[in-house]
Amino acid sequence: MTVPARPKLYHIAHVDRLPSIVADQCLWCDREVVRRAPAGTTIGMNSIKQRRLNELRLTSRPALLVGDCVPFYFCPRSVMLYLIYRGNHAELSYRGGQGPIVHFEADLHAVVAWADAQPRRWAFTLSNAGGRDFEDRNDLGQLGEIDWNAVRARDWQHCSYGKQAEFLLEQSFPWHLVERIGVQSRPTYTLAVNALPAHGHRPPVEIRPEWYY
């Protein structure tokens, strides 16, 4: 599969974290989340988060640790969301299911243009950046190295390595670059809409069941 003309990026979070994201006007990397302890539920596996914070470095951005970046996938309905949906992984402390999880969608090229203007370091990986053998790149000309067939696959049991490709942005991700919020159900839609600011950037919230399991 060829590289999409306008690749989209997706970050997932619990809906109860949305008010703090709006208040801070950004999504924080894990290191800042640990330091700031914002209100809301933390999802993800602690052992992997610790590895990202303390061990895993990017080769294309020397000295930058994965945990110092805000992570995005190139698709909704990620492998991580599946683990949340199943709720039976020994290393997953969150057990609230996928219902309260929201997707933040952004445009890759818009994000890179913003980051380069700051400047703010960014990179993308060809697999899960929580693994010890991932490869990373910092040149959009190399996007073709991502396995886009795996990224788009709905049945990914035999291509989970490629489906977990990530985009990483150093330190924080600005709220104004969130183009859309996707949710699974009406109750979560209501919570998300009510958390948006009265003034300023209000990305549309949409019920997108196809983004979930």
Image (cartoon, grey):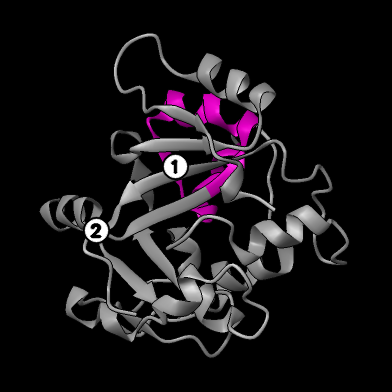
**Quadrant holding the N terminus:** bottom left
- Residue 46, placed above or below residue 192: below
Residue wearing tag 2: 6
Q: Amino acid at mark 2?
A: Arg
- Residue 129, placed above or below residue 102: below
Whether residue 45 appears in this view of the structure is no
Of tags 2 and 1, the one toward the viewer is 2
21 in magenta: yes
Image x and y of residue 211, in percent: 57, 49
Q: Looking at the rendered structure, which numbered label has been put on residue 50?
A: none
Question: Disc 1 on helix, strand or loop?
Answer: strand
- Dot 2, crowdedness within 10 Å: few (<14), some or many (≥20)? few
115 in magenta: no
Q: Which residues are magenta?
A: 12-37
**Of callouts 2 and 1, the N-terminal one:** 2
Image x and y of residue 185, in percent: 66, 31
- Residue 121, placed above or below residue 161: above
Q: Amino acid at mark 1?
A: Leu
Contact, mark 2 vs mark 1 (Cβ under 8 Å): no
Residue wearing tag 1: 27
Front-most of 137 and 160? 160
Task: Name the side, left or right, on which 85 lies relative to 64.
Answer: right
User: Residue 200 occupies which quadrant of the picture?
Assistant: top left
**Residue drawn at x 27%, y 67% as measured from the top left:** 4
Front-most of 149 and 32? 149
Give the residue furthest to the left.
117
**Residue drawn at x 82%, y 54% as measured from the top left:** 93
Give the residue furthest to the top.
198
Front-most of 136 and 55? 136
Task: Name the side, left or right, on which 205 lies relative to 209.
Answer: left
